[in-house]
Image (cartoon, rainbow, N blue to C red):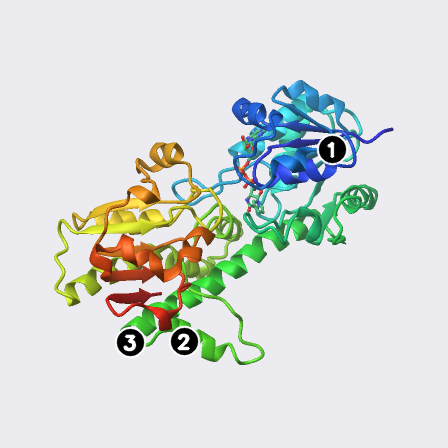
Amino acid sequence: MAQIIAVVGLGYVGLPLAVAFGKKQNVIAFDIDNHRIQELKQGIDRTNEVENDDFKGTSLEFTSNPSDLSKANFIIVAVPTPITENKQPNLVPLLKASETIGHNISKGAIVVYESTVYPGATEEECVPVLEKASGLICGEDFFVGYSPERINPGDKEHTFTKITKVVSGQNAEVLEKISSVYGSVVEAGVYKASSIKVAEAAKVIENTQRDLNIALMNELSVIFEKLNIDTSEVLEAAGTKWNFLKFSPGLVGGHCIGVDPYYLTYKAQQVGHHPEVILAGRKTNDNVGNFVATSLVKQMIKKNMPIQGSTITILGFTFKENVPDIRNTRVIDIVKELKDYDINIQITDAYADPSEAHEEYGIDLIPYEELTPADAVVFAVPHEKYLEEGWSMVDHLLKHGRGILIDVKSKLNKEECPANVSLWRL
Ligand SMILES: NC(=O)c1ccc[n+]([C@@H]2O[C@H](COP(=O)([O-])OP(=O)(O)OC[C@H]3O[C@@H](n4cnc5c(N)ncnc54)[C@H](O)[C@@H]3O)[C@@H](O)[C@H]2O)c1
């Protein structure tokens, strides 16, 4: 039987993989967001992961009609797995997608989940929904697998085909099939995990490990602030040891590193273990925005600058550099804290969509050219465009080129800091 692939959920993860498969064969590319489908049909990807030219030579059938899924026998699921306000896994999109697939699944099909989940979610949560909606039996009438995604938005080097793909399946035969499907497009090759749970756990710990390493750097930054030592200089010195891991302090936002550990901690608690280290890391990272804002206010007080009524510019609002994604941006923590001091805040971002920022956070982004000179600048997100301008930005961003600059990610060369500017960094 000819293999027909469908991808369910065409976001940062789903679209690049649909395009990669679409270069080799016909792919049914399904999303519930019809607006997104209409844009994709015109070759527009507002996530900037896929260029207009990349759509050329692909065979993609963009659709928001669930019944089109019945034509596929290999269905890949890449829908969001966010957390609730109480930091619990929110499996609603995943289960809804499973229900849609269940209603439209063909006998013999394989469903491969790519969404990040806790170990056990595919078999314990998704399979029952697939079975109920389809009236079929998993392992007999259809099959499941799990293959976590490792892409890094905005990173043009580590793209879908260039990262080793971990694959897993509910039995050896399914694993072989999944492995050969992914192997046909992933140049870096596939790694066969021994079970679905192992593959699920591997993904969630990759991001948990990163979160914890950054948390340690953030905690060091708080300690060194009190000791009046520059964290970047300490890290540079320590980094000369062969086995010192190179992480740096910063805001941890987005929908992966700051979210995925909660999937693991939820599952850990379910099985009776309180994960103290992981949760401590999360708490530390969630406090960074607050620390940056209060440190700025302290700097201003030290310099006898008035706080109330002062103007501060926030440069960058997305959750990381060079992407338009503002979901779970922790820059908002800096903004909220500064607003408590009755400071006038103007925020600009080179990539974020102003209407989205307004809708999601009630923030009105200002075009860079329209910023008025400020008392202080928080260089929150080191987008390439700002880095290209470098220190000369302070000439027009700060009143008379003087004031405070907070370089959150320590990206500007400290040695070149103009004399009229006082620099603070994490
Ligand atoms: N973005 C990343 O860097 C990244 C990296 C690795 C893994 N992941 C994981 O991959 C998964 C997807 O993340 P993303 O960033 O691509 O999300 P996204 O929000 O960019 O895209 C998800 C897409 O799924 C669609 N969708 C939602 N519910 C649906 C449904 N029921 N049926 C069909 N489509 C539906 C949405 O409309 C959206 O277009 C998540 O589990 C995430 O944790 C993301």
**Which disc is residue 233 wearing?**
2
Disc 3 crowd rating (10 Å Cα; few below 14, some 14-19, many 20+) is: few
Label 2 secondary element: helix
Q: Could you tell me how far apart the alpha carbons at marks 2 and 3 are, in whole angstroms?
A: 12 Å
- Mark seen at residue 57: 1
Q: Quadrant of residue 294?
A: bottom left
Q: Quadrant of residue 97?
A: top right
Provide residue 76's location: percent of width, then percent of height: 68, 36
At label 1, which amino acid type do we have? Gly
Which corner quadrant holds the C terminus? bottom left
Q: CA distance from mark 1 to mark 2?
A: 49 Å
* Mark closest to the chain's N terminus, 1 or 2: 1
**Percent coordinates x, y for residue 167 in the rendering:** 72, 48
Judged by depth in the image, the label closer to the viewer, 2 or 3, is 2
Secondary structure beneath disc 1? loop
Per the rendering, the mark at residue 228 is: 3
